[in-house]
Image: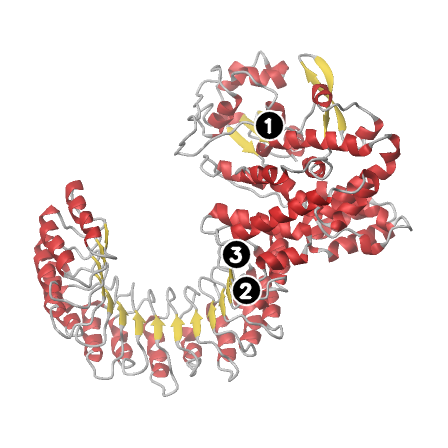
Amino acid sequence: MVQKIVYDWATGKIYPDFQFVFSFKFRDLNTINCRINLRNLILFFYPYFGNVLGELWKNPEGLLFIFDGLDEFKDRIDFADNRRNTEPQFMCTDPECRCKVSDIVYSLIQHKLLPGCSVLVTSRPTALHLLKKAEISVWAEILGFVGDERKEYFNKFFEDQTVAAAVFKHVEENEILYTMCYNPSYCWILGLSLGPFFTQRDRKHQQVPKTITQLYSYYIYNILQNHGREIESPRDVFLKLGEMAFTGVAEKKIVFRNRDLIQYNLQPSQFLSGFLMELLERDDSIQSVVYTFPHLTIQEFVAALAQFLTPDPKDIQKLLSEADSEEDGRFEIFLRFVAGLSSPQSAWPLEEFLSPFLHQTTCRVIDWVKEKVKGQIGNTATKAGKRNLLNAFHYLFESQNKALAQATVGSVETLSFSGLRLTPIDCVALSHVLELCDTIKHLDLYRCNIQCEGLRRLEHVLYKCQKLRLTSNNLGDSGVKLLSAALRKPGCKIQELDLRNNNLTDSCTKDLASVISTNQSLTDLDLGFNPLGDSGVKLLSVALRNSGCKIQRLGLGDNKLTDSCAEDLASVFNPSLTDLNLAYNNLGDSGVKRLSVALRGPDCKIQKLNLGDNKLTDSCAEDLASVFNRSLTDLNLGDNNLGDSGVKRLSVALRGPDCKIQKLDLEDNKLTDSCAEDLASVFNRSLTDLDLGDNNLGDSGVKRLSVALRGPDCKIQELDLSGNRLTDSCAEDLASALSTNRSLTDLTLGANSFTDQSVPALRRLILTCRTLSLIELRDNRFSRNGENQLKSLQGTRSGLSVKM
C-alpha cells in the first residue's frame, strides 16, 4: 500500500503539495541500534540527498514522512501524558540532534521536529492504542477489497474459472473466510490453500478449511506436500524454524539474517525456501541476503506450530500466560493459532508430515484456554478487560471445541463490549459463542462500530437475547432490515432493543413496523437520535396502533419531529404504552395541544412522558395541566420556555387531588423568584423529585422554597437547584429548613456562588438533615480550605457523599 502511495505521488496522481516523500519501514528502523539524527537517518536510506537536506529543512510544509508498520517496531513510543514507571519520551526539535530513532518518530508526529511537515503512520489495529494520545489529525481505516472486488481477485488468481467459482463459493459461504478477504494478502493465502481442494481429485470436500487456523494448516500442508520429501526430518527443522519465528514475534522482528539461521541451527535449503523468502538488502554499500516469511501471520502460525512440536511441553501454560500479558497485541494472532491447533481438524493435515502432536501439549493448551475464558468472563469493567474477553472468544472459535465453549460460556447471562470497536471477524467469533450459549439475556454492543457488515455476522443469533443494546453502531437502514429478520424469528426473546444514533431514516420504518405489529416479545424500543422525521413516525404509528403490538416504552428523542406528526403520535396512546420519550424535537405548543387530547383519553396509560427541549412556551401550559389527573407520574419539561406564567398554571393542576406526578423536570425554563410561591405550594402533594436547575430563582426564590421544605407533609427526596445564581444569603434558610426535613436524600447546589462564608451553614445542613445521602457543591467559589471542611463530613455518616 505504501509503495502505491509513493508511486502515485511520484507520477503526480496524488499529493501535489509535497516536494519530497520519505518512506521508512519500522522493520528497517529496528536495525538501527545507535543514536542518530534525522539528517543521517534520511541519508542512511536515501544517500543521494546529502547536498539538499539543509534546503529541505527551510520548507517543512513540502515534506511527507511515511512510517510503515508501527506494530513491527521493537521500541516503544509513549505518547501518554502520565508516564509512570517509564522514562519520558525525549523531545527532539533539531534535525541535527542525535537521539533514539523512537524519539525522532515521536517528535515528528507531535509536530516538534520540523513543525509543518506531514507524517503518515500505518499500523495493524493491535498497535493503534499507542497512537491514541498522539497529535493525530486524521484517522483512516484501509477497507481493502469490498463487494465484487473479492470475487474478481479469485477470478484472476485461478486460470480455470470453474475452480475460481468453486473456491469463491466456499469462501462466500464461510463467514470468517469471507470476512478475511478484505485483505489481498489473505486472499493470496486463501487461493493457495483452497485451490487444491477443487483441483485435486483425492481431496475430500468435507475437509475444506473453515477457520483461520485450519486455512493456515493447509497452507503449510501444501508446501510440505511439495517439499516434505526433500529433507530427512521435517519435524526437527520445523521446530527450529518455529522457535526462530517465535523469537521474532516476541521481539517484533520479521527480517532474519544468516546469523539468526545459524543461531537456530538452520541452513538455507530448498525445503526452507518454501517458508522463507530471500531478499537482497543493501548495508553500507554491501548487498546481503536476508530472510522473511511471506506474511507476518505465516510467521505467527509457524511460531504457534512449534509449541506442538517441542518434546517437552511442561512450560507451555506459563509461556501462553506471559504472551497473553503483553499489552501491545504482539502475541494476539499467535495465541489464536495455538488455540486453533488444539483442534484435530487443524492438526491432522500437518501430522501427516510432522508426526502426531503430543497429546499432553494439546490438553494443556485446552486447559489454558478454559481458565482464560472463565477468568475473563466477569472481568469486563475496563476496555482492556473487554479486549481480553474478545480474544478469549477468538480462542474458542479457532479451537472449534464445542464442549470447551459450553463449559466456559454456556451459562453466561450478560456480555458487554461497550466502547470496544468490533471488526467483522470479531463479530464472527462473538456469534460462535452466542450460538453455544442458551442463557444469554443481555448483550451490550454500545458504540462498537459493528456497522451493517458486523451485524450480518451476528444476525442469526441475536434472537436469543432479551436485552439488546446496539446504540451508535452506524447500522443504517440496511442494518435494520437485517435486524428485523432476527426479530421475526420464531422463538425470538428480544424484549428491549436500543437503536439510538444509528443513522436510521424513514426508509427503515416499514421494516420496523412489520416487526412491531407482530413480535410478541418486544416491549421496549428506543429509536432516539435518528432522523426518522414525521413521515417515519407516521409509518410506525400504524403498527403501534395494531392490537398485537406489545410496546410499553418507546424512545423517539431527537427524531426531527414537528407538530405535523402530533396526530399520528396521539393515535398510539394505546393501553400498553406507558413510557414515551419525545425530547429534543420540535413539537411546539400546537403539537402538545394535540397530544394532550389523547393523554386525557380513557385508554391512555402513559406514566412517563419526556417533552424536554421541544420549544414549548406558557401557551401550552393549560393543555399540559389538563392531563395531570390521569396516570402520569413522571414529566420532563426541561429546556423549554414555560416561564413563570407557565409554572403558575401547572402548579394549579399539581395541587389537584387526583394529580399523581412524582417526578417533574423544569430545568432551564426561564424561571425566576416570581414563581417560587407557586412551586412551594406543590411540595405537600405526591412530588418527590424536582429539577429546577439552570433557572434564575435567586436567593429570594430559594428562601420561599425553604418554607415549603420545612412543611411536615413535604415529600421531596431529590431537589436540583444548580445554576440558579444562589449566594451565601440563602445558605442559612436552606440549613434551617432542612434541619427538620425527613425526606430529602439528594440535593444539588452546584454552579452557584457560595463562598467560605456559607461553609458553617452548609456543614450544619449536612449534619442535621439525617436523610441526606448526596450533596453536590461543584463549581462554587469555595477556597481549598472551605472545600476540605465540607468534604471532611463525608465519613461522618454511612453512605453520605459530598461532591465538590
What is the three-letter code of the residue carrying label 3? Asn
Horizontal side of 425 relative to 777 (left or right) equals: right
Residue 398 drawn at (x, y percent): 67, 50
Which residue was labeled with disc 2? 440
**First reached walking from the N terminus: tag 1 or tag 3:** 1
Contact check, label 1 and label 3, Cβ < 8 Å: no
Which disc number belongs to residue 601?
Answer: none
Number of numbered discs on residues: 3
Q: Is residue 181 visible?
A: no
**Picture quadrant of residue 655:** bottom left
Which disc number belongs to residue 473?
Answer: 3
Q: Which residue lies at the image location 73% right of the left edge and 30% below the top edge?
A: 241
**First reached walking from the N terminus: tag 3 or tag 2:** 2
**Image position of 123 with respect to 24: above or below:** below
Question: Residue furthest toward the right?
Answer: 201
Horizontal side of 764 relative to 360 (left or right) equals: left
**Image position of 294 with respect to 727: above or below:** above
Question: Residue furthest toward the bottom?
Answer: 602
Which residue was labeled with disc 1? 26
**Image position of 769 with respect to 97: above or below:** below
The N terminus, quarter of image:
top right
**First reached walking from the N terminus: tag 1 or tag 2:** 1
Residue 368 drawn at (x, y percent): 61, 46
What secondary structure is found at the residue carrying circle 3?
A: loop
Q: Which residue lies at the image location 71% right of the left edge and 36% below the top edge?
A: 306
Nearer-the-camera pick, 250 or 545: 250
Nearer-the-camera pick, 143 or 423: 423
What secondary structure is found at the residue carrying circle 2?
A: loop
What is the three-letter code of the residue carrying label 1? Phe
